[in-house]
Amino acid sequence: MEGKKIIIAIDGYSSTGKSSFAKQIARKLSYIYVDTGAMYRAVTLYCIENNLIRNCELNVNKIIDNLNDIKIQFIFNNNAEKSETFLNGENVENKIRNVEVSGYVSAISAIPEVRTQMVALQREIGKNKGIVMDGRDIGTVVFPDAEIKIFMTAKPEIRAMRRYTELLQNGDNVTLQEIEKNICERDYIDTHRNTSPLKKADDAVILDNSHISVEEQMQWFEKIFQSVIEKQYL
Ligand code: DC
């Protein structure tokens, strides 16, 4: 699976396995994987830690004023063999996955100024291609010319069960009901916000992985990748 480097955009609903799939593809192609959800999660963590969210209310003006003080980096951890998210120099890879951050991240990511800042960073990271980027607006807004666009979906109850199992393994004390509620709320906010709502790009291919294995998913991708690469050489 070699050749000219392209951009692979993976969008879709929460907990459809976008990041696992994107990481697997990146490993196979020796591409860079970029988790854009982690960027919005890092901004959310910053807001929580700096009291920009009080009693469930966002201080939107202050959040916008503080945007230039939020520095997000991805640094590869050789021991863990994965890239980790840093917020102002601190490794926040685990903190950004907690339930409190998950509860606020959709609201934070709906702020247009936050999106403008993150999209600029995403375009900068992807300017040399050879990337697999996952998120909600990668194929529609960030890289509308991406050579491969995938839109992932799966039944909400299946997504909730997968996420629940993952959080339990991390030692989080959560219930399946909480997770299902959070997933449905995020689906709603992500698809109904005014700026860059989650939607399938017209030229994206749909992947519903409710009932297919990780291996089948990869075989499906390899066929798509081959056909795109062959077209590039015509
Ligand atoms: O992929 P994730 O669940 O870690 O993303 C967290 C939230 O960030 C998600 O609810 C919506 C938002 N997000 C977004 O608005 N745009 C992106 N490109 C990526 C994530």
Image: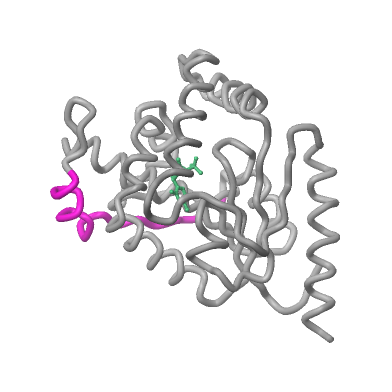
Q: In the displayed structure, does residue 228 sit left or right of residue 6?
A: right
Q: In the displayed structure, does residue 3 sit left or right of residue 128?
A: right
Q: How many marks?
A: 0
Tell me the quarter of the image containing the N terminus: bottom right
Q: In the displayed structure, does residue 218 sit left or right of residue 158?
A: right
Residue at image location 20% in from the left, 32% down from the top:
57
Residue at image location 73% in from the left, 41% down from the top:
208
Which of 100 and 158 lies nearest the eye of the viewer?
Answer: 158
The x, y position of residue 110, in whole percent, is 35, 47
The x, y position of residue 69, in whole percent, is 20, 56
Residue at image location 26% in from the left, 54% down from the top:
70
Note whether 49 is above or below 167 in the view shown. below
Q: Look at the image and give the residue range highlighted in magenta.
A: 60-78
Q: Quadrant of residue 130?
A: bottom right
Which of 93 and 25 lies nearest the eye of the viewer?
Answer: 25
**64 magenta-colored:** yes
